[in-house]
Amino acid sequence: MEEPRALTALAAMANPTRLRILRALVAAEPQGLTAGQLAETAEATPSRASFHLSNLADAGLVSSTRNAREITYRVEFAAIGGLVDYIIRDCCRNNQTVIACCAPSRNCGGNPDAARGVDPET
Amino acid sequence: MEEPRALTALAAMANPTRLRILRALVAAEPQGLTAGQLAETAEATPSRASFHLSNLADAGLVSSTRNAREITYRVEFAAIGGLVDYIIRDCCRNNQTVIACCAPSRNCGGNPDAARGVDPET
DNA sequence: TTTCCATTTCAATGATTCTTGAAATATGAT
DNA sequence: ATCATATTTCAAGAATCATTGAAATGGAAA
């Protein structure tokens, strides 16, 4: 990933509504969620949800496919991974402290569960 | 890291001038760089650099210490790591595609060097 | 104290981004 | 065709963020 794309991805994630949308899509993998379901989940009007959805799509963070009149969105994990890769490598020059936060027994966010590699799902 | 702080960190990084500043600080580790040096590196006026520097400091991404009349800034790798941790764990629920981007032999940004774990420095 | 240097703060302006609600588009059903 | 549903697009206004240049602050030297 190059800088302009990384900046777009960072800006896309730097919004509470879009982060909620992203989170809902992560939870809804691999089926995805329709624009309407996302609007409901994010407590946004259809128009507002659509605005944020196209922002996320422009950033490559989500993809969409139309099924009849519904449009289903899915999170693009590879794009998020590309951003993480960019932060670690291009931005932080493979700094060990940053890399350590990806390890299964990490503790970088102040969450005690994280240090034990506990899946937040369970 | 909790959401509000992650949002602040993402917003801080989502700006070309601040990303340049961060990059310069990463390269200048562990001594850090003064506000004046950073302004020069980022090709910004002192006032503009100061604005972005306090934004980065508010986000916890840099720290500063005063030495005589100069103020030296340093990158806070732990905070960047915390953000990466947040993206991977809280946001992406430990998705493997995202985690794989932190591995030494990763290839998530389209850069062939990345797959071989080549340090961009060398 | 006066002066100089590094940096920050402030107010004004300009630029982006977000929200809202109405209208448009696309698709399917009657 | 007509209608209903799902979604997007658009224009206007509100809110937030960035840039500028001038003034203020903090600190060291003359």
Image: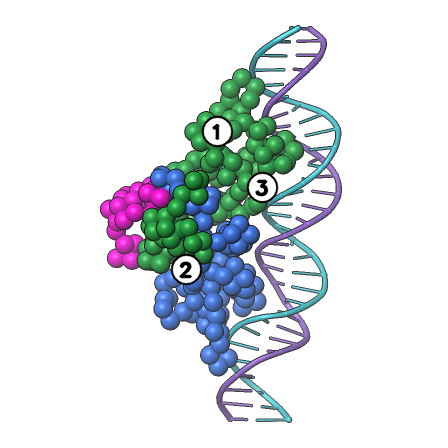
Chain colours: A blue, B green, C purple, D cyan
Give yes or no for residue B28 being in the magenta stretch.
Answer: no
For the point 43% across and 62% down, the residue is A76
Viewer-nearest residue: A83 or B117: B117
Residue C11 against residue B82 in the figure, above or below: above
Viewer-nearest residue: C14 or A38: C14
B42 with respect to A87 (left or right): right
Residue type at numbered disc 3: Thr
Residue B94 against residue A95 in the figure, above or below: below
Question: Which residue is under mark 2?
Answer: A78
Which quadrant of the view contains residue C13? top right
Q: Which mark is residue B32?
A: 1
Quarter of the image with the C terminus of chain A is: bottom left
Task: Tell me the chain of label 2.
Answer: A
Question: Mark 3 and mark 2, same subunit?
Answer: no
Direction front: furthest residue:
B122
Mark 1 or mark 3, earlier in chain: 3
Magenta segment: A99-122
For the point 43% across and 54% down, the residue is B112
Q: CA distance from mark 1 to mark 3?
A: 17 Å
Task: Tell me the chain of label 1.
Answer: B
Few, some or many residues within 10 Å of mark 1 (<14, 14–19, 20+): many
Q: CA distance from mark 3 to mark 2?
A: 26 Å
Question: Mark 2 and mark 1, same subunit?
Answer: no
Residue type at numbered disc 1: Gly
Question: Which residue is under mark 3?
Answer: B17
For the point 27% across and 49% down, the residue is A104
Q: Main secondary structure of the magenta part?
A: loop
Total tally of numbered discs in the picture:
3
